Image (cartoon, rainbow, N blue to C red):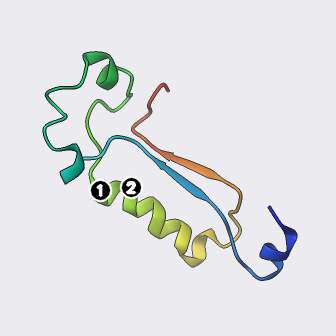
Amino acid sequence: MKPDLGRRNITVNVVQAGVMDTDMAAGSKDNLPPIIMESHAIQRFAEVREVAAAIVFLAGPEAAFITGSIIDANGGFNA
């Protein structure tokens, strides 16, 4: 990460989302191989609001000192 970003109070982070219950995934729940859901500690699809909460946190003042991080909002995939 470029030091000039930090000096300008710009943080750069990634939210790595897991399988979410969206229109794009419609019909996928019943067609996934069992191993996919068995690989998650929390064996269900994420709700969009759950992943959005991580994004909102990173965009807020409480995360002002977090940068260069990856937050896995993936239900414990391969945990």
Q: Quadrant of residue 9?
A: bottom right
Question: Farthest residue in the right direction?
Answer: 3
Does 51 sit left or right of 43 as displayed? right
Q: Quadrant of the N terminus?
A: bottom right
Rendered position, 19 above or below 22: above
- From this viewpoint, is residue 22 visible? no
Q: CA distance from mark 2 to mark 1?
A: 5 Å
* Residue 39 percent coordinates (x, y): 39, 22
Report the residue marked by disc 1: 48
Q: Residue at x 23, y 49 (%)?
A: 24
In this view, 48 is above or below 74: below
Callouts 2 and 1 close, C-beta under 8 Å: yes
Q: Residue 16: x percent and y percent?
A: 50, 48
Secondary structure beneath label 1 = helix
Q: Which mark is residue 51?
A: 2
The amino acid beneath tag 2 is Val
Q: Looking at the rendering, which quadrant does residue 6 occupy?
A: bottom right
Q: Residue 12 location, x and y as percent? A: 66, 65
Q: What amino acid is found at the position of numbered circle 1 in the picture? A: Val
Q: Secondary structure at mark 2?
A: helix
Check residue 67 in the rendering and tell me which mark sits there, or answer none: none
Residue 65 to residue 54: above or below? below
* Label 2, residues with CA under 10 Å away: few <14, some 14-19, many ≥20: some
- Left or right of 54: which side holds 6? right
Q: Is residue 79 above or below residue 4?
A: above
